[in-house]
Structures are given as C-alpha cells and as structure tokens.
Amino acid sequence: MTSKRGRPSRRTEIVIAAEKLLRERGLNGMTTRAIAEAVPCSEGAIYVHFKDRLSLVLEVLQQSLPEMLVPLHSLVNNVGVGEPERNLMDAVDALGRFHVRVTPMLCSLMSESELLIRFRQSLSDSAKGPHRGIATLATYIEREQKLGRIDPDVDAKTAAHLLMAASFFHQFTTLLFGHADKLETRRLVRFALRKRKAGGPRKST
C-alpha cells in the first residue's frame, strides 16, 4: 500500500520494521520505541494503526501468508497438470519461504503466555492455522491419486503432515543452530509419496 504521494504508507512501514525487529531480536526486542526509531515515527503513530502489540504481530504474520497460500492454491489448480512430484516440490519450497518468515515469531510467542493465548484464540476465531495448509496438500494428493498419477496406497494426510512438518522443523533447527544443510525437497517429496512395501498393510478405505 502506498500513500497519495507515492511513498509507502505509514502502516506498511510499521509492519516492515516490526517484522525486521521480530526476526532479529524476538518479541522482547520488538518494542514500540524500537519500531518508532526504525520507521521513523512517533510511538503514538503506531497505535493509530494497531490496537496493541498482538495486533501488529498478527499483521506481520498476515503479510507473509501469500508466500504460502498462493502457491498452495495453485497446487490444487494444477491437478492433472505437469508432474505431481514437481508440483509438490514447488509447494514445499513455498512453505519453506513462509516458515523462514514466521518461525522466529512463533518461537518467540512460546515465551509470552498472554500473547500465546490470544494468538491461539485469533487463529481459532479466523479458522486459520497449519491445518489449512496440510488439508490443501492432502487434497491435492488425493485428487492426483484418483487420476492414477500418485500411488493409491500413499496415505495422503500422512504425506501432507510430513511435508509441512519437515519444512517447519528444518527452519526451526536452522534458527536453533545457526546453520543447516539445504532441505532436499525432491528427496522429501519422494519419501512422502513412497509406495507401500510388499506385504505391508494396505491403506484402509
């Protein structure tokens, strides 16, 4: 969003500054004073746009959602198009970009019980959360199975959970240790879509 004069709106500048501070310093370092200095603006200007700090944190998360949602929506639209493995790799790459942005915030929330409770409630009220992304991945896999392009013995929900969890955990360990090997997306997708071993239990119907 831009102002009438063509410069970014103050609200946008506040969100950008808050996200940068959140990633670099965590929630404790994302103070209104630090944000005001980074924009720059007065601390009062922040509250013109946001009711409180949680509202600002939620907006930071909301701004990052397109990095995950747009590719996931495209994934479902690509049923029967291209290669399923490639489509899922692109989706996992999108999840990775999303997790790079939100993992620092989510980890910081764990140390502030009041904010965490309010954050949980906001997700519940808006029906948002990782379950939505997992459901989209599972839906794609199930539809490709109906077309015979993914093995029918693959458990779609388990595969979807695996892809989401692997993406998040990779970013978490990267933050924890300061480095990590590159996530092998192709290998991950192939493992999630692996065929049932001979003699193993069949998928229930």
Image (cartoon, rainbow, N blue to C red):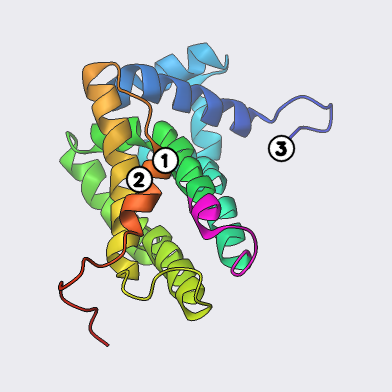
Q: Is residue 169 visible?
A: yes
On the image, the x and y values in percent for residue 139 come to 45, 71
Residue segment shown in magenta: 78-88
Is 6 left, or right, of 187 in this rendering?
Answer: right
Q: Which mark is residue 188?
A: 2
Depth check: 104 or 50 in front? 104
Tag in front: 2 or 3: 2
Q: CA distance from mark 2 to mark 1?
A: 5 Å
Q: Secondary structure at mark 2?
A: helix
x 24%, y 28%: residue: 173
Residue corresponding to mark 3: 1
Q: Inspect the image, locate mark 2, and give the three-letter code of the amino acid beneath it.
A: Leu
For image coordinates 42% across by 15% down, the residue present is: 34
Name the N-terminal-most of marks 3 and 1: 3
The location of residue 56, given as percent across then percent down, is 44, 38
Taking the view exactly as shown, the residue that stands out farthest to the front is 198
Residue to which mark 1 is pinned: 185
Quarter of the image for residue 4 reads top right
